[in-house]
Amino acid sequence: MHAIADPDGALAQWRARALDFERAVGRIVLGQERVIRLLTIAVFARGHVLLEGDVGVGKTTLLRALARAIGGAYERVEGTIDLMPADLVYDARVGEDGRPRVDPGPLLRRGPELSVFFFNEINRARPQVHAMLLRLMAERTVSAFGREYIFPFLQVFADRNRVEREETFELPAAARDRFFMEVQVKAPEDFAARRALVFDPRFHDTDLLIAEVPEAIIDYRSLDQVSREIQSAIPASDAIVAYTIALWDAIRTPDKAGIALPGVRMDRLVQGGASPRGMSYLIRAARVRAWLEGRAIIVPEDLRAVFPEVMAHRIFFDPVYEMRREEISADLCRVAFATVPAP
Amino acid sequence: MHWSRSLPAVRPCRRAALALVVALLAGAPAQAAGVDLYAPRAFGYLIGDTISLEAVVTLDAGWRLDESALPRPRPVTYWLDLKRLDVKPETAPDGAPRYRLTLTYQTFYSPLEPRALDIPAVPLAAHKGDARQTLTIPAWTFVSSPLRELVASQRGNPMALQPDIRPRPYPLAGDARLAAAAAAVAAVSLLAFAAASGWGPFAGRHRPFATALRHMRRLPDLDTQLGYEDALQFLHRAFDDAAGYRLFGEDVHAFLAARPALTGEAETIDRFFTASRLAFFGDAPETAMALLPPEALIDLARRLAATERRSSIQNEAA
C-alpha cells in the first residue's frame, strides 16, 4: 500500500538486492541484525560510520563481509600512536636491489576502486592522521606524489576502542560530526547466536566464513546514483517536517520540551551540537530506512530507528555530564521520542 | 478581679474652683480643671496584691497635661511599687481635654493585723503656652490584712510551706469540637486533592479514550480533511496516554500483546494507524478516509472507551 510507485522499477530491484545483501551479511555475523540494518542504511546513504564496541564482537568480520558483498577493494589500517599520515599514503622500504623505494601505501595501493577503508582503533592515531582522514571523508581525495588521488566510491569505517583511554587521542567534535553514524556494537544477546558463535566451528575460521558471502551482490560503482535516486524518490510531508523540527527543539532545549531525566539538570545538560548537518543526515538516513521498509513516505518510526546512531554523538553535554555520556544520551533520545507528539 | 467603682473620693480642686467662681461671679474665666479618682474596694488586701487606681483628669480648653511630669513605674516606698502607668487622652462631652490615668500599684506590706495604709498623692502638671498649673491625684487609703495567724491556733508550723493549689479541670469540650471540625475539613480537602491528582482509588478514573471520544464528538467538521485529521490526533493522544509513551504504528503489536482486552479491536486499530500514516505522512487523506471512514473512526473510539470502562487498559507504569 505504501510501496514505491513502480514495483518493477529500478529502486524496487535495488531494494531486493539490498535485502539480499543484509541477509548474506546476517548469515555470517549472528545476532547483529540492528547493526547490519544500520550499516546497510549508511551504505545506501553514502555515509561514513564510526563503530564503537568491545573487543572481539565481530566488527572486523562484519566489515570484511560487507566489503566483499559491496565489491570493490578493501583496505584496513591499524591506528597506533606513532602512525603518521605518510604511513597511510606511502610505503617506504628497501627494495630487492638494496635501494630505498617509495611505493603507494595502503590508501593508494588499490587505486580508485577502493570502496571500503577500515581504520581500526582510530583514537590511537594522532591528530595529524585525524585531519587527513577528515579530508578523505569530506572530499574523498588525498594528495600524494605531487597530485590528487580521487576515490569516488570510498566509504570510511572507523572503529574506536572504548575500553582503554591511555595513550589515545579523543576525536575532535568536528571529526565526529563528519561521521554519518556512530554505531555501538555489542556482543549478541540471543542464546542461539551466542551458542553458535562459540561452539560452531564454522565461525572459528574467519577467512572461510567470509568466503561464504557472495561477491558483489550490490555494485559499488552504482551506489552513488542509487543513493541520489532514493533521496529524491521519497518526499517528506508537512507533518514529518513539523515533527522533525519539534524533535530537534526537544534535543536542543530539553527543559522547554518538558523532558526530565533523573539526577540531571535539564536546563544545563545540552551545551550545543545537534547541528543542521546532523539533522540533514537524520532525514537522509530516515529516507533510506523508509525505502528499505518498502515505503515511499517517511514516518516517525524511521526517525526513531536511526536517531541515536545519527544524532547522539553530535549532542554536546555540559562537562559535568560528559562522563556519563552514553547513559544520558541514550535516555535523552528515548525520552524525546516518548515526549514529542506525532503526528 | 472584683472591681467596684466608688463615687469620686475627693474632688478638692473642683471644690476650690467652685469657690473661686462664687467669689468672682461672672467675668472671670471658669477654672474647671479637676481630678476624679475612681478606686476599688478599700479593704481586704494581702501582701503581693495589685491595686489599680483610675484618675480622670479634666482640663480647661487649650490646656495639656505635662507628660514629662507624670510619675514613672518605680518603687514608691519600701513596701509599695508603682508597676505601671497608662495614660489615655480623651475629650470630655463639652469638648474639654480629658486624660484617663490608670496607676497600678503592688503592695508588699506584711501587717501583723489589719492596718490602714496610704498610697501617697501624685502631683501632676499642666500647661497652656507659658501658663502652668499643678494638679494632684489625691492620696488613697486601704486596709491591708495579714496572710496568716499571728500565733498558731492549730498544730503545725504556720511558717511551713503550704501545698500548691490543686489544678482545676479546664473545660476542653469546646476545643475538642473545634479540633474535630478542623480534622473533618482537612480530611475532605485531602480527599478532594486526591481526586484531583488521581491518587489511590481515584487513579482508575482517568479514561483517555472517553476523553478522546468526547472531543471527537464535539468536532463540527468531521467529514472534512481538517476535522478528520483532528479526530485522528485526539485518538492518537488517547493511545499515547494509555501506553505511557508516544505510540507509533510499529509499536502497536507490542501494545496490543500487553492488553488482551483489546485483542478484538486489533484489526481496526491497525487500520487506524495505517490511515493516520496516510493522512499525515503520505499526503493522501482521501485514501485514509476511504480506508477508515469518519463514522468508523468514531465507532472505534466508542468501542475503545467502552472497553476502557470495563477493564483498565491503562499502562500501570505510566
Image (spheres, rainbow, N blue to C red):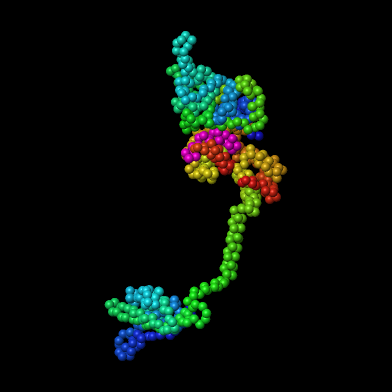
Q: Quadrant of the N terminus of chain A?
A: top right
Q: Position of residue B132 (x, y in %)?
A: 29, 79
User: How many numbered marks have been drawn onto this rendered protein structure?
Assistant: 0
In-front residue for pair B50/A182: B50
User: Which residue sits at x=60%, y=23%?
Assistant: A65
| Outermost right residue | B264
Predominant secondary structure in magenta?
A: helix
**Does the magenta-highlighted stretch encompass residue A312?**
yes
The answer to whether B61 is drawn above or below residue A212 in the figure is: below
Name the residue: 46% across, 82% down.
B150
Left or right of B99 on screen, residue B285:
right
Q: Is residue B92 visible?
A: no
In the image, residue B201 lies in the stretch drawn in magenta: no
Q: Position of residue A239 (x, y in %)?
A: 57, 40
Residue A305 appears left or right of B143: right
* Residue pictured at 58% horizontal, 65% vertical: B179
Q: Residue B93 lies in what quarter of the image?
A: bottom left
Vertical placement of A115 versus B124: above or below? above
Q: Residue furthest left?
A: B130
Q: Residue at x 46, y 16 (%)?
A: A92
Give coordinates of residue A84: x percent, y percent: 45, 23
Q: Which portion, as a residue range, is magenta?
A: A298-321
Q: Between B193 and B182, which is closer to the camera in this rendering?
A: B182
Residue B204 showing in the rendered view: yes
Where the C terminus of chain A falls, by quadrant?
A: top right
The quadrant in which residue B232 appears is top right
* Image position, residue A53 (x, y; %): 56, 30
Frontmost residue, A87 versus A201: A201
